[in-house]
Amino acid sequence: MTFTQELTLAEKVRFDFPILHQEVNGKPLVYFDNAATSQKPLLVIDTLRDYYEHYNANVHRGVHTLSAKATDAYEAARDKVAKFVNAKSRQEIVFTRNATEAINLVAYSWGMNNLQQGDEIILSVMEHHSNIVPWQFVAAKTGAVLKYVELTSEETFDLEQFQKLLSEKTKLVSVVHVSNTLGCINPVEEICSLAHQHDAKVLIDACQSVPHMPVDVQQIDCDWLVASGHKMCATTGVGFLCGKLELLQEMPPFLGGGEMIAEVFLDYSTYADLPHKFEAGTPAIGEAIALGAAVDYLSAIGMDKIHAYEAELTAYLFQQLEKIPQIKIYGPQPDAKGEGRAALAAFTVAEVHANDLSTLLDQEGVAIRSGHHCTQPLHRYLGAAATARASLSFYNTREEIDIFIKALKETIDFFTGIFG
Ligand code: C6P
């Protein structure tokens, strides 16, 4: 009798990621810093190279062949992103530099022009700085007031408190879909529905959800959704805003310059149609085209499959971490199947600084992030100056979790041996 063992998703895809096949500090690399940025498959690297080798030209400007080819590929990438998040129309997708710029676009274009003294903006304490600071700018300029949703005892989004914060004063709710620190998956459909009952608009920061699970903007019914390409297997330098068409139509341009205009006179200008109204200047052309390739790559695997495999990794990661008594993990517990949270764990170890953990793990070839992960208010709320964070992706394996856990145990033993 012959047995054929089915390959895991990671075993099938790992060779698509050249960077994973190297040693760091003499040890095989274990890359567990995917929430900071993902690695890139050959399809994305080759697409970028192909653009620069064969048809690098500016878009929407020239009539020559290379420019037409670059324009077609750039606009095809927009179609791919629109389909990936199930936007109603391709005009709803605006390419930005990253999620941060997409949030700033909404803050400056919509927030500065629609909010006034006493209006309320609801955020949560788990937001990334990029979903706090722009709204602080808006509040300072308009007199709007910032309100914060806190955490439940399981360290998840407190929906009950959110409902209490909502009132006729609420004009905007801007919250993260999946926390980059707690790993909790927020009930965004419910958040949108509740906010809309109060005529408030909703922005969803989908930086940590779009790369790991199916995301459908029509199902969520958010007004805007933002994400960064570099976290979803694409390059740095490109991200996107997906906004409801009617809203984007009403919003004035954010940045002025070439590309976003219809006609320019010495004393006034008229603006281009969507989405170009919001894409001033030469965009990140090759990067946007490569984002289209990343979307092709993820779609070919299937976001359901990616999510299911990452849930298996989550279950295993948590089983192993829970065996280390000195560790405190933040955010909700996964269920037995690893569902209910993202494949990341931010944790502290009594008496050992997160930076020291990260530095010693690096000596073993294991890359994790330490610090506040751009969620300083959340860290203050949790009473942790810094956390160590292991964040996984679909190309990571159980064997890598074993290497990480072994290195982590040894590091803890080392520190408790010296200082304990
Ligand atoms: N989080 C992390 O290590 P930009 O920098 O614009 O590509 O992404 C900002 C951002 C916004 N929201 C969330 C939920 C995020 O996680 C991030 C980026 C990285 O967790 C870098 S700080």
Image: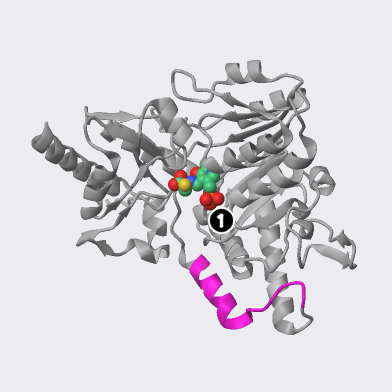
Q: Does residue 151 sit above or below 86 in this rendering?
A: above
Tell me which residue sits at (69%, 81%) in the image. 66
Instruction: Classify mark 1: helix, strand or loop.
Output: helix
Colouring method of the image: one colour
Give the amino acid at mark 1: Gly
Relative image position of residue 298 (x, y in whole percent): 54, 55
Residue 326 appears in the rendering: yes
Q: Is residue 387 left or right of residue 137?
A: left
Q: Is residue 178 left or right of residue 218?
A: left
Q: Which region is colored magenta? A: 44-61
Tell me which residue sits at (37%, 52%) in the image. 7
Tell me which residue sits at (49%, 36%) in the image. 179
Please, what is the dominant secondary structure of the magenta stretch? helix
Relative image position of residue 97 (x, y in whole percent): 60, 58
Relative image position of residue 121 (x, y in whole percent): 67, 30
Spot the residue most to the left: 417
The quarter holding residue 268 reads: bottom right
Decide: few, some or many residues near mark 1? Use Cα within 10 Å; few <14, some 14-19, many ≥20.
many
Quadrant location, the C terminus: top left
Within the magenta stretch, is there residue 60? yes
Q: Is residue 305 left or right of residue 347?
A: right
List the residue tagged with mark 1: 229
Q: Does residue 264 sit above or below 178 in this rendering?
A: below
Relative image position of residue 35 (x, y in whole percent): 44, 47
The quarter holding residue 81 reads: bottom right
